[in-house]
Amino acid sequence: MPESRPSNAETRRAPAHQQVYERLRDLVLFGDLAPGQPVTIQGLVARLGAGMTPVREAIRRLTSEGALEFQGNRRVCVPVLTSAHLEELMFARQAIEPKLTRKALERATEDDVQQLEKIDKKLDEAIHKGDVGAYLKHNFEFHNRLYAIADSPILTQLSHGLWLRFGPSLRVVCGRMGTQSLPDQHKETLDAMRKGDADRAAEAIRKDVVQGMVQVREALDLAGNP
Amino acid sequence: MPESRPSNAETRRAPAHQQVYERLRDLVLFGDLAPGQPVTIQGLVARLGAGMTPVREAIRRLTSEGALEFQGNRRVCVPVLTSAHLEELMFARQAIEPKLTRKALERATEDDVQQLEKIDKKLDEAIHKGDVGAYLKHNFEFHNRLYAIADSPILTQLSHGLWLRFGPSLRVVCGRMGTQSLPDQHKETLDAMRKGDADRAAEAIRKDVVQGMVQVREALDLAGNP
DNA sequence: ATTTTCAGGATATGATCAAATTTTGGACTG
DNA sequence: CAGTCCAAAATTTGATCATATCCTGAAAAT
């Protein structure tokens, strides 16, 4: 056991089940676990150096968020996206994200917009360098920042759940196609936000969402899913 | 071959954490737990006669579905709806449920529609008798049946999450106002489904959703929420 | 092909420890 | 003297772990 010491020093901020949840969530969100890959409790206990109870709880949470999937028997795995699922995700994201963008636009301060621009800049760098991991992180960060500005907890939670469902596949797509061909309506969104044009901002985000999901769909079709 | 033979007649039961989850979910969904009410692990262990681990896992699941809420310190309670939350719910339901209705209409068989009518009939009886509990159950059952016909797991799961968030408040509203004044666009929906008019069915369900949510909003406003 | 065996892994329990809430008992103030 | 407030003990509740039991799937044996 390297450094898992419960009752000492500074370790008493977040409970273990919360930390495990966050780590496992990021593992799924950024595609460190591939679609179809089995997820075992004991595997995670070993991988994350945590106890069994916190791991179980994290798995339950992520399962009910759609990030993981029960397999009838008592096994759990990362779900494989079918094109039917992808259609549902695309519809839901098109409904929710433009709304969040409108709300964000209503509430955004100058500082908020600057932070978004900063994130978008890091995203451009990641694309330029071909760094898939950084691309995925900053792309999510951009949208997530927008949600935070919108201050709409329920819609934000819904959106997070949707991200968790296509995160693993997005990673697969990027690994296959590189970062060059990835679209990005972020600058259009930011420009519209600065000018207070809610319709244009919402439409830009909608396009961003659709383009991303279409990329995933095409890549999945190539891989031979029905 | 369809019926595999269990070695023991009693052995085919669902795991404890699943049973606890379902019971606790229904407790929230049908308002047996009031908004704001604290939910303790040990209280549920006593109330449901289950072990600590299954209860814990059920609480985690329901928390990530929005049915329960962390209270900063490690307590959990049934969330109290604010009108901001209600607006988000109303938006999300208006986006999702009409879509599910359209999908259901595409796939519904004659038998499906008859089952919906049967449920709606039981709902009418519950209204007539003023049986709030039965009203809540059958109203949910109607919508849930529609989701099942639509065969869209992701949108269905999103919708279930939304129901869990306003279930407790809906109970409060019904308890306060009785069942007489409750609106119901179900017959309009069914008629449109029979005639294959997707637009009309979707719009009817949208109205049904809005009317229900508006009832909740008005009742909450009366109770003095911002 | 059917049954048996077996190992890996999931489920569930209760004990134990830690944190937060409540209670209690006084000391201080008006 | 009564009331208020604060601190510390007591109690309740949550978090974690180690362990025992039970399933499942697959290999081995008949």
Image (tube, coloured by chain):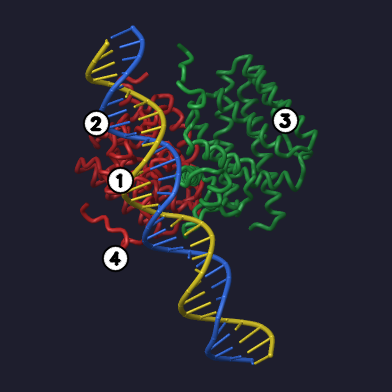
Chain colours: A red, B green, C blue, D yellow
Callout 2: SS: helix
**Is label 2 on the same chain as label 4?**
yes
Chain of the residue where label 1 is placed in the rendered structure = A
Which quarter of the picture shows residue A41?
top left
Crowd rating for badge 2 (residues with CA inside 10 Å; few <14, some 14–19, many 20+): few
Task: Write down the residue under mark 1.
Answer: A137
Indicate left or right for B218 with B51 as reference.
right
Callout 3: SS: helix
Alpha carbon of mark 4 to alpha carbon of mark 3: how far?
A: 59 Å
**Is label 1 on the same chain as label 4?**
yes
Chain of the residue where label 2 is placed in the rendered structure = A
Q: Residue at x 52, y 39 (%)?
A: B21
Q: Which mark is residue B123?
A: 3
Q: Residue B76 appears at what percent x and percent y?
A: 52, 53
Alpha carbon of mark 3 to alpha carbon of mark 2: how far?
A: 53 Å
Q: Residue A85 appears at what percent x and percent y?
A: 43, 28
Going by the numbered disc 1, the residue's amino acid type is Lys
**Is label 2 on the same chain as label 1?**
yes
Task: Write down the residue under mark 2.
Answer: A177
Q: Nearer the viewer, mark 3 or mark 2?
A: 3
Callout 4: SS: loop
- The reply to whether dot 1 and dot 4 touch (C-beta < 8 Å) is no
Q: Nearer the viewer, mark 3 or mark 1?
A: 3
Q: Which mark is residue A9?
A: 4
